[in-house]
Image: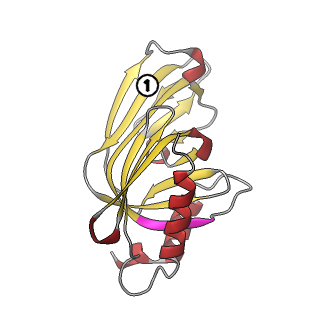
Amino acid sequence: MSEIFDEANMRSVLGKYIPDGETLLAGIHAISKETHVTGIFGKCICTEDGLVPDKNGGTVALNKKKYADYDVYVGITQSSLIIAECEKCSYLYQFKDNPAVREEDIQEVTSGLLFDDLGTCYPLTDIQSCQMKKGWMGSVKCFVTMKNGSYFKLVLPKLGGVGGGMPHHGEYRDAIMARLSKSNG
């Protein structure tokens, strides 16, 4: 548990999802209260652990949900929001084959996509809204809604854990909140 509150570990976990050419500007430990990731994927087939491209494959609507508290790292780069779990956890997955959707809503699968990696990195421009409220003991409740319908209910703690493993937590939290508040569509 203590390695969750370690800045080097956080950088390592978030680093897996940083888009090419970008760098992590700020990252913190947070608590996810609710996660709902949605996506429409085309020209693919569904396997046990992900989606793989297939030129003859169909369209799959996917929902990835979790309604329990769990530890996440939240980070921002020059143009992305990253939300990654601190430790492996389980989600509820729901699938629908060949949904009736607009063609422009379909993401073509061009390389293997693991279910674990869905909903971890979003362009900041895809944020539809971000609502922030004061929480308990200096925390901030943050409700981020994406343009595709995905959403995250997060708690951004005031402190970065005990032991001093996240010395930049306060300044990084302020930077993340400032950037997300600009997305208040």
> Which quarter of the figure is the N terminus placed in?
bottom left
Render colour scheme: secondary structure
In percent of the image, x 43 and y 15: which residue is there? 99
* Residue range highlighted in magenta: 25-29
| Residue at numbered disc 1 | 61
> Compared with residue 57, is residue 169 higher up or lower down, i.e. above or below?
below
Q: Where is residue 147 in the image (x, y as percent from the top left)?
A: 51, 33
In percent of the image, x 46 and y 38: which residue is there? 50
> Compared with residue 52, is residue 22 higher up or lower down, i.e. above or below?
below
Find the residue positioned furthest to the right.
21
Assign a secondary structure to mark 1: strand
Looking at this view, is 182 or 40 the one in front? 182
Q: Where is residue 54 in the image (x, y as percent from the top left)?
A: 58, 24
Most common secondary structure along the magenta stretch = strand
> Compared with residue 62, is residue 59 higher up or lower down, i.e. above or below?
above
Mark 1, Cα crowd under 10 Å, few <14 / some 14-19 / many 20+, is some
Q: Which amino acid does label 1 sit on?
A: Ala
Looking at this view, is 127 or 20 the one in front? 127
Find the residue positioned furthest to the bottom.
163
Which quadrant holds residue 36?
top left
Looking at this view, is 103 or 97 the one in front? 103
Query: Would you say residue 87 sits in the magenta stretch?
Result: no
Which quadrant holds residue 47?
top left
> Compared with residue 173, is residue 18 higher up or lower down, i.e. above or below?
above
Q: Position of residue 163 (x, y in %)?
A: 38, 87
Looking at this view, is 98 or 38 the one in front? 38
In percent of the image, x 61 and y 51: which residue is there? 80
In percent of the image, x 28 and y 71: which residue is there? 137
Q: Where is residue 161 in the image (x, y as percent from the top left)?
A: 37, 78
